[in-house]
Image (cartoon, rainbow, N blue to C red):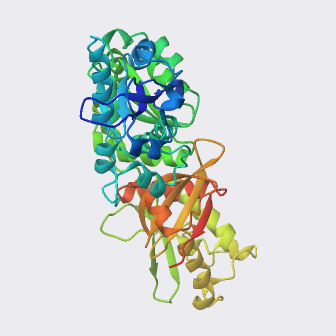
Amino acid sequence: MYAILDIETTGGKFNEEGITEIAIYKFDGHTVVDQFISLVNPEREIQPFVVNLTGINSNMLRSAPKFYEVAKRIVEMTEDCIIVAHNSEFDYRILRTEFSRLGFEFERKTLCTVELSKQLMPEQDSYSLGKLTRALGIPVSDRHRASGDALATVKLFKILLAKDLNKQIIQDAVKAEPKYKISTNHKHILDDLPSITGVYYLHDTYGKIIFIGKSKNIRNRVNQHFTSSNPKSKKMQNQVAAVTYEATGSELVAMLKESAEIKKTKPSFNRTMRRNKFTHALYCFTDEKGYINLRIDAADGRKKAITTFTNYQSGKQFLINVIEKYKLCPKLVGLDATKKSCFKFSIGECAGACIGEETSESYNLRVQEVIAANIFDNQDFILIDKGRAVDEHSVLLIEDGIFKGLGYYNLNYQITNKKVLESIITPMENNRDTIHIIQTYLRKNKQIKRINLTQ
């Protein structure tokens, strides 16, 4: 659990400042579950430049509660939480100073979104809250007021959680949980999980991720792990102390995140999933008569594949589909071993490329359509899919045929704007698995939107 906060102060000498406004949003990693916002009478003068910056003046604070009157609520809101703030060193110091004036030692773990942003978004020009929110398209109201800045920090923190492919933030958070809050009762763990699409993480008592999975129904899938009687599941059940998750909205995003994060974090129970996700691939060659032939063969990293398949059967089904759609010859895709004309020719469904009745020029045009529809070479485009909320979409970026990464955007974004795209995309590794995942998903989900990018 996180307490994301922002504090406005009087300004003045170091450790002599007083709080004029505080906003705390209790955040469970997905949604805000509680909040506290209050003006505070600092019982001291506010520096003129601060009045100009925040708009908070002494007249506004005369009837506001003094710090000792809100101290109990602040303790309650931040108890067993990690304090998150933009420049947390400042906010945490101010809080500790105010509590020490009351004779109370205030101690909490902290996370700084400035430092996290530098680690996870090294390409940014500036890490001030104002410039970061503009670059990332985060809407901000009441800038330089505690509530507005704290809410902007919540939105920024959500982006940082999504960009943290090593999952260090959530592992540290689970590790920081008080031991009495970590449940070995699987029913209690399940009660906190939603029935949504996303990636889930099984943690041990040290917060370490021991298994990563993805599902269209996280709660049901985790329940299967907890109720399975196979030896691997039994062993895993004995080690699980907590389950966290990341909503993705899109099944494609969930599959890509699962693949990338397993490769990065190498959980002990995911060993089999670190291997390639495909066994067969589609290749082409031109025969001695000039016809382009297609073949499904065992995947070979030394040869350039058009697309890949989980097994031979799915590759064969793909060829059956393209024969129908593009009127290709079964012989020239390796599915008809006859030495004469193919069966399709005898029933009038093949133009006769197998016996030279259709010219290679005419036939090859249709084969090239198949290749172009299933290969990413030299192409720049984005794929738009479901987001985590009704007003959001997910987006994948492909540049020059290479998968660059993914992100989320609100519906009012100019998503084809290159600068906006680059700011919201979490860079991810392009490898054979990611291309396989994307191409397989596109074959099965025709409704996904593709937008070609122009220079």
Q: Along the horizontal axis of the image, is 380 left or right of 344?
A: left
The answer to whether residue 309 of the structure is visible from this angle is no
The answer to whether residue 192 of the structure is visible from this angle is yes
Residue at 39%, 54% (x, y): give it. Answer: 433
Q: Where does residue 202 sit, x and y in percent of width and height?
A: 38, 26
Residue at 59%, 57% (x, y): give it. Answer: 384
Q: Along the horizontal axis of the image, is 227 left or right of 325?
A: left
**Compared with residue 419, is residue 94 higher up or lower down, i.e. above or below?**
above
Residue at 45%, 46% (x, y): give it. Answer: 53
Residue at 38%, 31% (x, y): give it. Answer: 45
Q: Nearer the viewer, residue 89 or 297?
A: 89
Q: Where does residue 170 sit, x and y in percent of width and height?
A: 35, 32
Q: Where does residue 138 sit, x and y in percent of width and height?
A: 51, 50
Tell me how many marks there are: 0
The quadrant in which residue 166 appears is top left
Q: In the displayed orientation, state which residue is furthest to the right.
A: 348
Q: Where does residue 337 sit, x and y in percent of width and height?
A: 54, 69
**Compared with residue 69, is residue 150 higher up or lower down, i.e. above or below?**
below
**Compared with residue 271, is residue 126 higher up or lower down, i.e. above or below?**
below
Q: Quadrant location of the N terminus?
A: top left
**Compared with residue 402, is residue 387 higher up or lower down, i.e. above or below?**
above
